[in-house]
Image: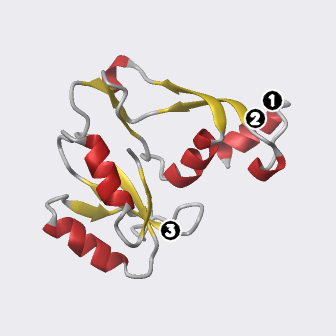
Amino acid sequence: IFTAQQAKSLGIKIVDLDMVDSIDLTIDGADQVDSNFNGIKGGGGNLLWEKIVAINSKKIVWVVDKSKVVDTIGAFPLAVDVIPFGSQHVMQNFDKAGYEPVLRLDKEGKPFKTDSNNLIIDLHLHKIKEPTQLADNLIQTVGVVEHGL
Protein backbone atom coordinates (compact mmCIF):
# COMPACT_ATOMS: atom_id res chain seq x y z
CA ILE A 1 0.00 0.00 0.00
CA PHE A 2 2.83 2.38 0.85
CA THR A 3 4.43 1.85 -2.57
CA ALA A 4 1.14 2.57 -4.36
CA GLN A 5 0.65 5.76 -2.34
CA GLN A 6 4.19 6.90 -3.09
CA ALA A 7 3.76 6.13 -6.81
CA LYS A 8 0.49 8.08 -6.94
CA SER A 9 2.16 11.06 -5.25
CA LEU A 10 4.72 11.03 -8.08
CA GLY A 11 2.02 11.02 -10.75
CA ILE A 12 2.31 7.32 -11.62
CA LYS A 13 -1.02 5.78 -12.59
CA ILE A 14 -1.95 2.70 -10.56
CA VAL A 15 -4.26 0.12 -12.15
CA ASP A 16 -5.61 -3.26 -11.14
CA LEU A 17 -3.56 -6.14 -12.57
CA ASP A 18 -6.64 -7.63 -14.22
CA MET A 19 -7.14 -4.40 -16.20
CA VAL A 20 -3.95 -4.90 -18.25
CA ASP A 21 -2.89 -7.61 -20.70
CA SER A 22 0.68 -7.75 -19.42
CA ILE A 23 3.32 -5.76 -17.60
CA ASP A 24 6.38 -4.59 -19.50
CA LEU A 25 8.79 -4.54 -16.57
CA THR A 26 8.77 -5.50 -12.90
CA ILE A 27 11.57 -4.20 -10.70
CA ASP A 28 11.76 -5.78 -7.28
CA GLY A 29 14.22 -6.63 -4.56
CA ALA A 30 15.30 -10.03 -3.32
CA ASP A 31 16.31 -11.06 0.17
CA GLN A 32 19.07 -13.38 -0.99
CA VAL A 33 20.41 -14.58 -4.36
CA ASP A 34 23.17 -16.94 -5.48
CA SER A 35 25.37 -16.95 -8.59
CA ASN A 36 22.89 -19.29 -10.36
CA PHE A 37 20.11 -16.71 -9.86
CA ASN A 38 18.31 -18.84 -7.29
CA GLY A 39 16.69 -16.40 -4.93
CA ILE A 40 14.73 -16.01 -1.74
CA LYS A 41 11.94 -13.45 -1.60
CA GLY A 42 9.16 -12.84 0.86
CA GLY A 43 10.81 -10.97 3.69
CA GLY A 44 8.11 -8.34 3.31
CA GLY A 45 5.36 -10.96 3.40
CA ASN A 46 3.66 -10.33 0.05
CA LEU A 47 5.30 -13.09 -1.98
CA LEU A 48 2.07 -14.41 -3.53
CA TRP A 49 1.02 -11.06 -5.01
CA GLU A 50 4.60 -10.29 -6.05
CA LYS A 51 4.83 -13.62 -7.91
CA ILE A 52 1.49 -12.99 -9.63
CA VAL A 53 2.80 -9.65 -10.86
CA ALA A 54 6.14 -11.17 -11.88
CA ILE A 55 4.65 -14.07 -13.86
CA ASN A 56 2.60 -11.57 -15.84
CA SER A 57 5.63 -9.41 -16.63
CA LYS A 58 7.60 -9.48 -19.86
CA LYS A 59 10.81 -8.75 -17.98
CA ILE A 60 11.80 -9.01 -14.31
CA VAL A 61 14.75 -7.23 -12.72
CA TRP A 62 15.89 -7.96 -9.18
CA VAL A 63 17.82 -5.19 -7.50
CA VAL A 64 20.22 -6.38 -4.81
CA ASP A 65 23.38 -5.07 -3.26
CA LYS A 66 26.43 -7.25 -2.63
CA SER A 67 25.27 -8.09 0.90
CA LYS A 68 22.41 -10.15 -0.60
CA VAL A 69 24.59 -12.20 -2.96
CA VAL A 70 25.71 -15.49 -1.40
CA ASP A 71 27.29 -18.78 -2.46
CA THR A 72 24.33 -20.85 -1.23
CA ILE A 73 20.91 -19.41 -0.40
CA GLY A 74 19.17 -20.35 2.83
CA ALA A 75 20.64 -18.24 5.61
CA PHE A 76 17.73 -15.83 5.12
CA PRO A 77 14.47 -17.44 6.34
CA LEU A 78 12.33 -18.81 3.52
CA ALA A 79 8.77 -17.48 3.64
CA VAL A 80 5.94 -19.91 2.94
CA ASP A 81 2.42 -18.52 2.44
CA VAL A 82 -0.16 -20.91 3.96
CA ILE A 83 -3.90 -20.78 4.48
CA PRO A 84 -4.92 -20.42 8.14
CA PHE A 85 -7.08 -23.57 8.15
CA GLY A 86 -4.87 -26.48 9.18
CA SER A 87 -1.75 -24.31 9.38
CA GLN A 88 -0.60 -26.00 12.60
CA HIS A 89 -0.51 -29.32 10.76
CA VAL A 90 1.58 -27.74 8.01
CA MET A 91 3.93 -26.41 10.73
CA GLN A 92 4.18 -29.90 12.24
CA ASN A 93 4.98 -31.43 8.85
CA PHE A 94 7.66 -28.80 8.24
CA ASP A 95 9.10 -29.49 11.69
CA LYS A 96 9.24 -33.24 10.98
CA ALA A 97 11.05 -32.47 7.72
CA GLY A 98 13.69 -30.51 9.67
CA TYR A 99 12.75 -27.13 8.18
CA GLU A 100 12.72 -25.31 11.56
CA PRO A 101 9.40 -23.52 10.93
CA VAL A 102 8.43 -20.36 12.79
CA LEU A 103 5.06 -18.66 12.46
CA ARG A 104 5.70 -15.03 11.48
CA LEU A 105 4.24 -12.51 13.92
CA ASP A 106 3.38 -8.86 13.38
CA LYS A 107 4.59 -5.93 15.52
CA GLU A 108 1.85 -6.64 18.05
CA GLY A 109 2.82 -10.29 18.45
CA LYS A 110 -0.18 -11.58 16.50
CA PRO A 111 0.12 -13.86 13.46
CA PHE A 112 1.20 -11.82 10.43
CA LYS A 113 -1.53 -11.71 7.77
CA THR A 114 -0.73 -11.41 4.07
CA ASP A 115 -2.73 -9.29 1.64
CA SER A 116 -4.80 -12.44 1.02
CA ASN A 117 -5.29 -13.01 4.79
CA ASN A 118 -3.00 -16.01 4.78
CA LEU A 119 -0.21 -16.75 7.25
CA ILE A 120 3.53 -16.81 6.71
CA ILE A 121 5.64 -19.64 8.06
CA ASP A 122 9.34 -18.82 7.92
CA LEU A 123 11.61 -21.82 7.37
CA HIS A 124 15.07 -21.57 8.92
CA LEU A 125 16.95 -23.85 6.54
CA HIS A 126 20.45 -22.32 6.81
CA LYS A 127 21.51 -23.70 3.39
CA ILE A 128 19.34 -24.75 0.46
CA LYS A 129 21.38 -27.13 -1.68
CA GLU A 130 18.55 -28.19 -4.03
CA PRO A 131 16.26 -25.13 -4.41
CA THR A 132 14.27 -26.55 -7.35
CA GLN A 133 13.50 -29.78 -5.49
CA LEU A 134 12.56 -27.87 -2.32
CA ALA A 135 10.34 -25.50 -4.33
CA ASP A 136 8.50 -28.48 -5.83
CA ASN A 137 8.09 -30.16 -2.43
CA LEU A 138 6.75 -27.00 -0.81
CA ILE A 139 4.23 -26.11 -3.53
CA GLN A 140 2.89 -29.68 -3.45
CA THR A 141 2.23 -29.45 0.30
CA VAL A 142 -1.50 -29.18 0.93
CA GLY A 143 -2.19 -25.84 2.61
CA VAL A 144 0.75 -24.06 0.99
CA VAL A 145 -0.33 -21.28 -1.35
CA GLU A 146 3.13 -20.08 -2.41
CA HIS A 147 6.75 -19.93 -1.26
CA GLY A 148 9.58 -17.46 -1.58
CA LEU A 149 11.92 -19.47 -3.83
Q: Residue 40's quadrant in the figure? A: top left
* Residue 61 in sight here: yes
Residue occupying the far bottom of the picture: 85
- Is the residue under label 2 in contact with that under label 1 (CB below 8 Å)? yes
Which residue is at 79% across, 50% downward?
16
**Residue count near mark 2 (Cα–Cα under 10 Å), binned few <14, some 14–19, many ≥20:** few
Residues at marks 1 and 2, CA–CA distance in whole angstroms:
5 Å
Dot 1: element: loop
- Residue 66: x %, y % from top left: 34, 18
Callout 2 amino acid: Ala
Against 36, residue 14 (above or below) is below
Check disc 3 and report the residue beneath it: 118
Callout 1 amino acid: Leu
Which residue is at 19% across, 58% downward?
99
Which residue is at 55% across, 32% downward?
28
Task: Decide if residue 68 is on the left or right side of residue 74.
Answer: right
**Residue count near mark 1 (Cα–Cα under 10 Å), binned few <14, some 14–19, many ≥20:** few
Dot 3: element: loop
Q: Earlier in the sequence, mark 1 or mark 3?
A: 1
Please give the label number shown on residue 10.
1
Residues at marks 1 and 3, CA–CA distance in whole angstroms:
31 Å
Check disc 2 and report the residue beneath it: 7
Which residue is at 51% across, 66% downward?
113
